[in-house]
Image (spheres, rainbow, N blue to C red):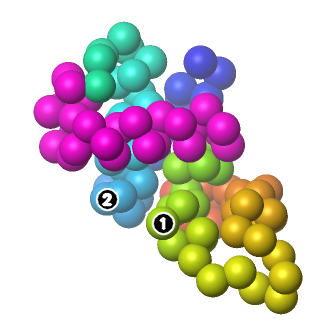
């Protein structure tokens, strides 16, 4: 995984938001070959969350861990549907904007 070093940096940063740390840990544990149940236990979240964030990562890469689909899919703005808005936000977002510098 080419982005593993970036994910490890985020997971280890004290300044990173706890939600982002949990999401990156889900992806890192998945990369280590852990199954859904093991990841949920290690990260202390539901299996549903593990599945959700694995899917988001596969679809949007690291940016997919930054945008919360439960929030971004609410209320279409100016005729732009949630998927288009999510993609625009995803493309404009980077981990440095979260206060995690590399």
Is residue 32 covered in magenta? no
- How many marks are shown on the rendered structure? 2
Judging depth in this view, the residue of 84 and 101 nearest the camera is 84
Real-space CA distance between mark 2 and mark 1, rounded to the nearest whole angstrom: 17 Å
Q: Residue at x 67, y 43 (%)?
A: 60
Locate residue 42, reporting x and y percent: 18, 32
Q: Please, what secondary structure does the residue beneath circle 2 have?
A: helix
- Quadrant in the picture for the N terminus: top right
Q: Please, what secondary structure does the residue beneath circle 1 have?
A: helix
Vertical placement of 18 versus 24: above or below?
below
Judging depth in this view, the residue of 26 and 50 nearest the camera is 50
Residue 24, visible in the rendered structure: no
Locate residue 89, reporting x and y percent: 73, 66
Residue bearing the label numbered 2: 18
Q: Residue at x 34, y 24 (%)?
A: 29
Residue 44, visible in the rendered structure: yes
Q: Is residue 42 left or right of residue 24?
A: left
Locate residue 8, reporting x and y percent: 44, 34
**Magenta stretch, residue numbers:** 37-61
Q: Is residue 84 left or right of residue 30?
A: right
Q: Residue at x 40, y 36 (%)?
A: 51
Magenta stretch prevailing secondary structure: helix
Q: Is residue 50 left or right of residue 94?
A: left
Judging depth in this view, the residue of 49 and 11 nearest the camera is 49
Q: Earlier in the sequence, mark 2 or mark 1?
A: 2
Which tag is nearer the camera, tag 2 or tag 1?
Answer: 1
State the image quarter where residue 32 is shown.
top left
Locate residue 91, reporting x and y percent: 79, 56
Residue bearing the label numbered 1: 70
Is residue 53 covered in magenta? yes
State the image quarter where residue 26 is shown.
top left
């Amino acid at each position: 995984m080419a982005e593993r070093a970036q994910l490890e940096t985020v997971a280890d940063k004290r300044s990173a938001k706890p939600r982002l740390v949990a999401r990156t840990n889900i992806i890192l544990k998945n990369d280590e070959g852990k199954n859904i149940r093991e990841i949920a236990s290690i990260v202390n979240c539901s299996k549903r969350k593990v599945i959700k964030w694995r899917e988001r990562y596969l679809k949007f890469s690291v940016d997919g861990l930054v945008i919360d689909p439960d929030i971004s899919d609410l209320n279409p703005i100016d005729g732009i549907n949630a998927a288009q808005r999510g993609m625009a936000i995803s493309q404009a977002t980077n981990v440095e904007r979260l206060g995690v510098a590399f």
